[in-house]
Image: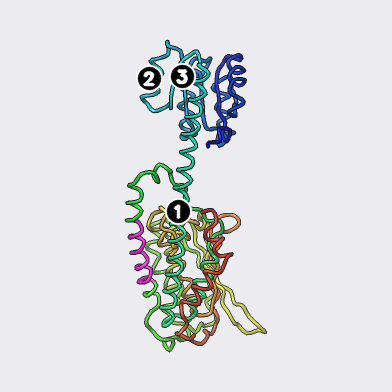
Amino acid sequence: MHDYKRYHVLYVDDEEMSLKYFSRTFGNEFQIITASSAADALKLIQERGDEIGVLLTDQRMPGEKGLQLLERARQLRPRMVRMMVTAYADFGVTVDAVNHGNIFRYISKPIQVEDMRNTLKRALEYYLLQRERDELLMQKLSVIQNMIIADRIISLGVLAAGLSQQLRNPLEAVRTFLHQTPAKLRYEDLDLNRLRDPGFWKDFHSQVLEHAHQVSELVRHLDNIALPESTSNETYVQPFAVISDVVQKARPRLDSLGIKVSLNLPENLPHLHVNAGKFARMFELLIEDEIVNLPSGSTIHLGAEVLSLSGNPVRLRFTLSDDGPGIPPESMRSVFDPFSMHKPDEQKFGLNLLGVFFLAHHYGGTVRAANASGRGVVYSLEIPVTSGPPVNPEVSSEEFVTKVLVNDALWEKLLSGI
């Protein structure tokens, strides 16, 4: 049994008596609202469009005609069922409206009460059916999407465990990265017409295969980061020299894009006990992200400060900031969600940042990435002057998976709005 009062019927006519008669005749069975002009009707549609299921309008009105109103309503609320009341003299206009798909049905004047009652019921049933179908499609999409995000997170746990032979603290790096993802991430609004199209699900299958390939690329990408050099290759390096070399190598690309670099690093920074290649790789990845994200005319600022305890340097804090548009949330989500329809560079953006997390945690450091209060993004890396001891490579991804799957706060953050 359908609830015919769940959504309103909007009746538009410039004759006040017609509006009163329509409301009095059908008001007991349906939720009727009325408007005496196309302008008033459009205002109601804009303000209360979610409440209106059926639009019924007369064709002949002063100012904007009924057909024009129906066309504008179709653009604003394509799911709204549209009908026209017309006299025989307007029959040609009605035929055009039907042929162009602008109306569900036309009603001839004078209105026959029983016929009108049945027509309103069929129109509301059709509207309710569309709503139910859309809700089912979105539920289907949501379930599949959540499953894929869960699979992606678990894959990262397995990946992290595999990297434990070459990197310290990989599980902690993934956990921290997940918690850094922006809250209330929402997948982009998908056109429900696409979900109704069987071709969408064929394309979706292809896209899942493509993202499976991207996961394998992620493994290769991070495997390149995890250089197969033991911790015995770690030595004391001068941060200024390493970072200056990274910037110098990237300068031709930066110059070609009109991006400036302001290097504000003290030359006498304490030496760090690190692998020079891994340390340099962090800044290579961050600069790569800047190249992807910054428009021409932007400036990158690189700075550093010493964090001391009892007068002894214990950590170095490196800060990379810019005056660009900030971190795109969709880039972070693209690491987990194959429904993110974005350019490949944005996928690379998220993977690069994940790589920085792995490398920083390898040395017992931390990474923070946030949009500045004004504009731009700020990356903050803290690296201990002396790296910690190697971790037990026997650590399993089971621990990571368990902690992630029972972490309600994390899941709420990742899946909120889906």
Query: How far separated are the C-alphas under marks 3 and 2?
Result: 12 Å
**How far apart are labels 2 and 1 at the CA level?**
52 Å
Q: Residue at x 46, y 38 (%)?
A: 130
Q: Is residue 149 visible?
A: yes
Q: Which residue is mark 1?
A: 295
Q: Could one spot residue 264 in this view of the protein?
A: no
Q: Earlier in the sequence, mark 2 or mark 1?
A: 2
Give the residue type that dot 2 points to: Val
Q: Is residue 356 magenta?
A: no
Instruction: Name the residue that disc number 3 marks.
Output: 107
| CA–CA distance in space, label 1 to label 3 | 56 Å
Q: Which x, y percent locates residue 270?
A: 54, 82
Frontmost residue, 256 versus 187: 187
The spot of residue 347 in percent (x, y) is 41, 60
Q: Quadrant of residue 252?
A: bottom left
Residue stretch in magenta? 207-221
Give neighbour class at mark 1: few <14, some 14-19, many 20+ (Cα, 10 Å): some
Specify the amino acid type for callout 3. Ile
Whether 109 is drawn above or below 205: the answer is: above
Q: Residue at x 40, y 75 (%)?
A: 225
